[in-house]
């Protein structure tokens, strides 16, 4: 979760270079569930069908981040490249959308 917050903070500073700390904290809280949803959607789509139920069970139980990470790396081919792309795509989408909001 800490890494996600660092990713989000960096993203928001790119989108809003002059953002105040109080606004940054609020926006982190707003963006976090959107990023989580995007990551989970991509993981479910990429998950081999025979591992999907196991993955869903893991996400509902108190597995450590290390256990979840280990499962994903064993289950999804080139997991690191895959998840990097998910985050990069999210960043590009978010920054593009902000052009139309301002």
Image (spheres, rainbow, N blue to C red):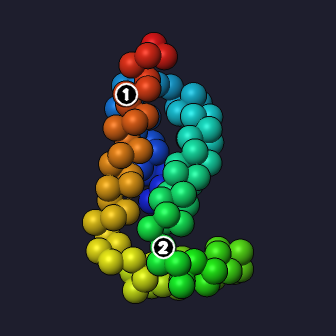
Q: Measuring from the top left, give residue 93's x and y in whole percent.
A: 40, 36
Quadrant in which the N terminus is drawn: bottom right
Q: Is residue 69 left or right of residue 83?
A: right
Q: CA distance from mark 2 to mark 1?
A: 28 Å
102 is higher (above) or lower (below) than 58? above
For label 2, count other residues whose C-alpha is less than 10 Å away and answer few (under 14), some (14-19) or many (20+).
some
Q: Measuring from the top left, give residue 70's x and y in whole percent.
A: 45, 85
Q: Are marks 2 and 1 in contact (CB under 8 Å)?
A: no
User: Which residue appears at 59% of the width and 30% of the height?
Assistant: 22
Q: State which quadrant residue 91 falls in.
A: top left
What residue did someone put label 2 on?
47
User: Which residue appears at 45% of the width and 42% of the height?
Assistant: 9
Q: Measuring from the top left, give residue 44's x and y in whole percent.
A: 53, 66
14 is higher (above) or lower (below) than 48? above
Quadrant in which the C terminus is drawn: top left
51 is higher (above) or lower (below) than 12? below
Q: State which quadrant residue 23 falls in.
A: top right
Give 44 or 36, whichever is nearer the viewer: 44
Task: Residue 11: tell me if it is visible.
Answer: yes
Give 27 or 93, whichever is nearer the viewer: 93
Q: Secondary structure at mark 1?
A: helix
Task: Residue 13: tell me if it is visible.
Answer: no
- Circle nearer the viewer, 2 or 1: 2
User: Which residue appears at 37% of the width and 27% of the height?
Assistant: 96
What residue did someone put label 1 on?
96
For label 1, count other residues whose C-alpha is less than 10 Å away and answer few (under 14), some (14-19) or many (20+).
few
């Amino acid at each position: 979760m800490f890494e996600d917050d660092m990713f989000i903070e960096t993203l928001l500073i790119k989108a809003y270079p002059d953002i105040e700390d109080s606004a940054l904290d609020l926006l982190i809280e707003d963006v976090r569930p959107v990023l989580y949803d995007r990551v989970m959607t991509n993981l479910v789509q990429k998950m081999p069908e025979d591992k999907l139920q196991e993955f869903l069970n893991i996400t509902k139980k108190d597995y450590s981040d290390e256990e979840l990470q280990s499962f994903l790396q064993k289950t999804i081919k080139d997991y690191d490249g895959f998840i990097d792309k998910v985050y990069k795509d999210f960043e590009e989408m978010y920054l593009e959308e902000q052009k139309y909001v301002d």
